[in-house]
Structures are given as C-alpha cells and as structure tokens.
Image (spheres, grey):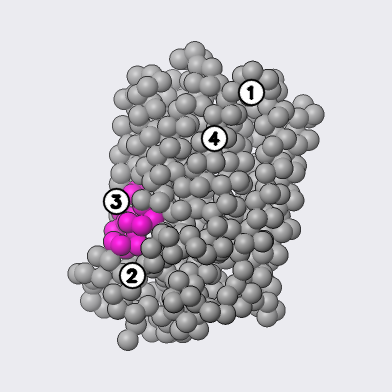
Amino acid sequence: MGPAQTGTDAKNHPETRGRVVRGLRWWICSLLFASTMINYIDRQSLAALAPFLKIRFQWRNQDLAWILIAFRIAYAGGQSVMGRLLDRVGTRKGLTISVAWYSLVAALTSLATGLRSLCVFRFLLGFGESANWPGAGKAVAEWFPARERGWAVAIFDSGSSVGGALVPFLAVWLYLKFGSWRLVFLVTGTLGFVWLIFWRWLYYRPDVHPRITREEREMLLRDQEASGLLEKPNSQSPGLFQLLRLPQTWGIVLGRFLIDPVFFFIMEWFAIVLVAKGFRPETSVLSFWVPFVGGDLGNFVGAGFSSWLIRRGWPVVRSRKVVLGLFGLGMLALIPVIYVSNLFLLTVLFAMATFSYAAWITMNLVLPSDLYPSYSVATVMGMSGTASGVGTIIATYLIGYVSDHYSFGPVLTVAGIAPLIATALTLLLVRGSKVNFGGILRKESA
C-alpha cells in the first residue's frame, strides 16, 4: 500500500481516469516554477515602481523601508503558520488558498491612497505569499527522488529570478505607457487566478493521482522506502520543539536568517542603488534583469553540480554541503560595488552575487526534503522562512536608516560578509544521519 494522503487532500481524491502523463512530476514542477514567478511579479511590482512612487508621494528611503517592513512582518510570521497549515491540509489545498489570497490582495493594492494604505496592502500580500516556498518544498518532497530534488528546487526557485527580471519591463512599461501605477497592480494581480485553473486540475499526491504512470508511482515509492520514511497512515508531523532540538534544523534556519536579507536587499533596493549612483530608471532598466538571469543560472549550476556528485556516489547531504561551501564565497562581489560607478561593472558584480546566492539557496531549500519526511518539510521550511523574514525586517530597517544618514557603503560591506557566516554555520550544524530519531529525520549518510 502507498503512503497515506496527509490532511484534507486525502478526502474526495479523484478515481484513476483519463490518459496517464509520462514524467508527470516535471509538469508539476513547471507549475511550481510558474507560481514562484507570479509570486515575485506581484511582490516586486512595488520595487520596480519605487523610484516613481518616491517622487509621487515624496517619500524618503525610510518611508519606503516601512512599506517593505510591513510586507516582511507578515511574510516572516506567515511562513511558520502556513508551513504548519500545509502539513495539515495538504499541498493542493494549501497553495490554492495562498495564491487566491495574495492575487486578490495584489489587485486590490490599486486602491491604495498613500503610505499607510500601502503598508496595509503589503502586509496582507506578505501573509498570502508566505506559503509559496514551504508549499513548493513539500511538493518536491512528495514528487521527486533524492537524485532529482536539487533540479526540482532549482526549477521552481528560478521562478523568483525570472519574475524579478520580468517585472521591471512589465511594471515600468505599463506605468510609462498608461501613466498609472494603479494599473500595474491590477494587471499583475490577475496572473495568479489563471495559474489556479491549472493547479486545481493537475496537482494531487502521487499515491492518488489519476494520471500518473505505474512506473513513476513505483519509482517514487521505492525512493521513500530507501529513505526509511514511507509514510504510514495517519502520519503526524513532529512538534516544533522536537524539530528545534535537532542541529540540522538550526543550520537550515540560521543560514536563511543571515543570507536571505542580502538577496532581498538586491531585489528591493537595486533600483535605488543605481539612482544613488546617478543612473535614471528609464535608461538603466536593461540592467535590472541581468542579476536575475545570474540567479537563474546559479540555481541550475548548484543543482547540476550537486546531482553530478550524487551520481558519482557521494552521499546526498555531503554533496549539498560542497555546493554551499563553494558558493558562499561568491557574494563577496557586493563589496567592490562601493567603489564602482560604471553601469556595466555594477551589473556584473550584482549578477555574480545573485548567481552565487541562487546556487547556495537551492541547496538550503532542498535540505529539508533531504533530511525530513514530507509531512515535516513544510514546517521546517516555514520556520526557516520565518527566520529569513525576521532577518530581512531587521536588515530593511537598517538599510533605510544607514542609506539615508550615511551611504550604501556600509550596507554593501555587511552584505558581502554575512553569507560567509551563514555558510560556516550551515556546514557546522547540518549533517546527515544514519538513524532517523523516531521518524523525525530521513536515514541518510553524511
């Protein structure tokens, strides 16, 4: 018998019918990529419009920081809440609720009248969007064997870079074409509702999916058996305190606490940094997408290198740690930005940083599915997401204050050093285990 369906996804699941789809897991992965891309388009629309909105509303950098912080507070707390919810109600229903929520809020942002109302809408958006990474990570744990999980995470996580690269063109073009920032939020908010049609049609767990081939189902069950964690009926996720007793959990959590604020600094302040360097948004828009292309490449280089090591017989967790160690150094490229005023060189340095970050974070995001059973993956990813959000909230406030009162120089220095500390802590605390601690961890070699 296959693993029991966790949560309410087990109820009213479809009978096997229709034509089977070969390689169904990769079609599901493409949906996870699309949801991540839409998630970032909705969130990054504000960052793309920030130079225009600062003039329109006469904001300081600290005013913009408060809007970003409002999003981050909800996003941080929401990830732990949504992660636990996803492990209870299931991936299909959990992501349906999340995407419907944040798409509606994104569209309603067009009704904002100023700083306070934008803070409210961004808070609501952050809470809705917080389920994406825990949900996608849980789906990967359900649908992919160990040798492919790195690739699956790279694909869905690259949606953030693609969305981040597309939104300056979409948002700035709409604003300049129609002269309305409100239209931008209205248009981007509709994308998630289109995605929901395909998600509701395609996603079920492998053990109940009506279109999965027998070969694919058996392959996934064999992988779960090999890990020692084929889910039993009525499997329950361990409690938060049980998970927090493990050093592996702390390695994942602290790594994201330190490194994610650096990435969000690039995502949310890149346009402002360019303006501070003397470049106009209208003439430097082509530079916006280059760091995100670098991020896309980093996702796949990190996943590909890790998978290559696994195929050569390396233990799964050790292969992930090699990638973490190599690419933890790459974000030092942010420090020379302080001394550069050439647009091409600035773009290259930011691209090097996002390339390295993407390879690094792909490994961090795949570790929960390497180390924990699927009924705990969303909870662990939710906790790490909350840590990421808390770190980013602190960093966002400090970025606004320091850049207003001094410059971006100290910010860029810290942004280059923090990933080194994140890497050291992750390598120290995360290790494979030959025992599963009563079902809390997968049995993996270190």
Sooner in the amino-acid sequence: mark 4 or mark 1: 4
**Above or below 98: residue 143:** below
Residue under label 3: 97
Q: Check whether the beta carbons of the residues at disc 3 and disc 1 lie within 8 A of each other.
A: no
Identified by mark 2, the residue type is Gln
Q: Are marks 2 and 4 in contact (CB under 8 Å)?
A: no
CA distance for labels 2 and 1 = 47 Å
Look at the magenta stretch and give its main secondary structure: helix
Q: Any magenta on residue 86?
A: yes
Q: Quadrant of the N terminus?
A: bottom left
Q: CA separation, marks 4 and 1?
A: 14 Å
Q: Which circle, 3 or 2, is nearer the viewer?
A: 2
Identify which residue is drawn at 43% across, 76% down. Answer: 439
Which residue is under mark 1? 403
| Stretch of the chain drawn in magenta | 82-99
Identify which amino acid the numbered label 4 is placed on. Answer: Ile
Q: CA distance from mark 3 to mark 4?
A: 29 Å
Q: Is residue 279 visible?
A: no
Residue 394, numbered circle:
4
User: Between marks 3 and 2, how big is the CA–CA gap?
Assistant: 22 Å
Element marked by disc 2:
loop
Q: Residue at x 47, y 82 (%)?
A: 228
Question: Of the residues tagged 2 and 1, which is closer to the observer?
Answer: 2
Quadrant hosting residue 263: top right
Q: Residue at x 80, y 29 (%)?
A: 339
Other residues around mark 4 within 10 Å, as few (<14) / some (14–19) / many (≥20): some
Across and down, in percent, residue 436 comes to 49, 77
Which of label 4 and label 1 is nearer to you? 4
